[in-house]
Image (spheres, rainbow, N blue to C red):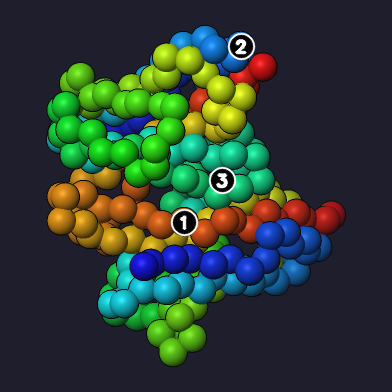
Amino acid sequence: AQSVTQPDIHITVSEGASLELRCNYSYGATPYLFWYVQSPGQGLQLLLKYFSGDTLVQGIKGFEAEFKRSQSSFNLRKPSVHWSDAAEYFCAVGSTFSGGYNKLIFGAGTRLAVHP
Amino acid sequence: SQTIHQWPATLVQPVGSPLSLECTVEGTSNPNLYWYRQAAGRGLQLLFYSVGIGQISSEVPQNLSASRPQDRQFILSSKKLLLSDSGFYLCAWSVGTSGANEQFFGPGTRLTVL
């Protein structure tokens, strides 16, 4: 069965520091991978996605993620964190089901705090 | 452009009372619709999905039900709320069957059952 693991529940970084959020997945075929961000009390916003091609994916707000098949990972990175990046981040893997819909399986999330 | 609405934004209900949360999507036709619950400090749990009017599938057995009376309307209901129904409820939509298609989320409803 497909699954997504985000090993870090909470991460704290200083503003201006680099960031890497880890994501590992379990999936039998080539996965469709997503990163979403959720600000407090808000819905989820898509940061970026990977489904084929270049393994380094650029997203919005200066984020990027790298797909590494050998490590079953899709880590999210940002070279310099801003205070406004404080939020919860979710990694997800997408699947196609015979019922005619697409399904996302989410990790438990990583809560990012940014110190000034 | 497509937009997704959820209401109410916040709801406080007593145990045993009924529930109705509504989600509507604009700017797209025949979307797949989803209801998720996010408990405090936890990830997203898929509750229901729908690929068309009147077609509802449940991911987990529970105290809730869902209906899709119109193409772009998705309703989450309960006859009698439990304390464990508290949480943040998110509606989402997508199109097509490919797993590469992202889901787009609404702003959510914060439900507190007392």
Q: Residue B89: where, in percent of width, then height?
A: 49, 32
Dot label at residue A38: 3
User: What residue sits right under mark 2 in the picture?
Assistant: B14
What residue is disc 1 on?
A: A106
Camera-side mark, 1 or 2: 2
* Helix, strand or loop at mark 3: strand
**Looking at numbered disc 3 in the image, what kind of residue is underneath it?**
Gln
Q: CA distance from mark 3 to mark 2?
A: 28 Å
Subunit under mark 3? A
Query: Which residue occupies the extreme right position in the image?
Result: A116
Name the residue type under label 2: Pro
**Residue A28 placement (x, y as % from top left):** 31, 77
Residue B61 at what x, y percent from top left? 39, 37
Q: Residue at x 16, y 26 (%)?
A: B54
Looking at the picture, tell me which residue is in the foreground, B108 or A78. Answer: B108
What is the quadrant of residue A77 in the picture? bottom right
Name the quarter where the N terminus of chain B is drawn.
Answer: top left
Q: Quadrant of residue B12?
A: top right
Q: x and y percent of residue B68 in the render?
A: 23, 24
Choose the circle earlier in sequence order: 1 or 3: 3
Q: Are marks 3 and 2 on the same chain?
A: no
> Which amino acid, by three-letter code, is at mark 1?
Phe
**Picture layout, residue B96 above or below residue B17:** below
Which image quadrant for residue B111?
top right
Q: Are marks 1 and 2 on the same chain?
A: no
